[in-house]
Amino acid sequence: MSTLTEIEAAIKQLPEGDIRKLAAWLQAYLDETWDRQIEADFESGKLNNLIAKAEADSK
């Protein structure tokens, strides 16, 4: 399974319960990826302007 089309076809062959498990796993994977990206952006300073604006707006 190396292409998206092949993966999609394989998913369509799974029982509904397995599809739901896969969907939950995929969501958890995406959440973890998002968290790592936000952390990296924070550490690199990419979010400094947004943080400063939020702090100024809250005053």
Image: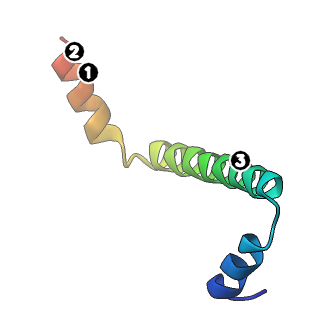
Distance CA(mark 2)–CA(mark 3): 36 Å
Q: Residue at x 82, y 56 (%)?
A: 18
Residue 36, image x and y in percent?
60, 48
Q: Closer to the camera, 28 or 22?
A: 22
- Residue for badge 3: 24
Q: Residues within 10 Å of mark 2 (few under 14, many from 20)?
A: few
Which is more N-terminal, label 3 or label 1? Answer: 3
Exactly how many numbered labels are in the figure?
3
Residue at image location 58% in from the left, 44% down from the top: 35
Look at the image and tell me in which quarter the N terminus lies.
Answer: bottom right
Which residue is labeled 1 in the image?
55
Residue 6 position within the rendered picture, expressed as x and y whole percent measured from the top left: 71, 86
Residue 27 location, x and y as percent?
64, 49
Name the residue type under label 1. Answer: Glu
Q: Residues within 10 Å of mark 1 (few under 14, many from 20)?
A: few
Against 26, residue 1 (above or below) is below
Residue flagged by tag 2: what amino acid is it? Ser
Instruction: Give the CA distance from mark 1 to mark 3.
Output: 35 Å
The residue wearing badge 2 is 58
SS type, badge 1: helix
Q: Secondary structure at mark 2?
A: helix
Q: Position of residue 9 (x, y in %)?
A: 70, 81
Relative to the observer, which residue lies in front, 24 or 18?
A: 18
Quadrant in which residue 49 is drawn: top left
Query: Closer to the camera: disc 2 or disc 3?
Result: 3
Q: How is the image coloured?
A: rainbow
For marks 1 and 3, give the one nearer the viewer.
3
Q: Which residue: 74% across, 88% down?
A: 2
The residue carrying pointer 3 sits among few (fewer than 14), some (14 to 19) or many (20 or more) residues within 10 Å by Cα, namely few
CB under 8 Å between discs 2 and 1: yes
Q: Residue furthest top?
A: 59
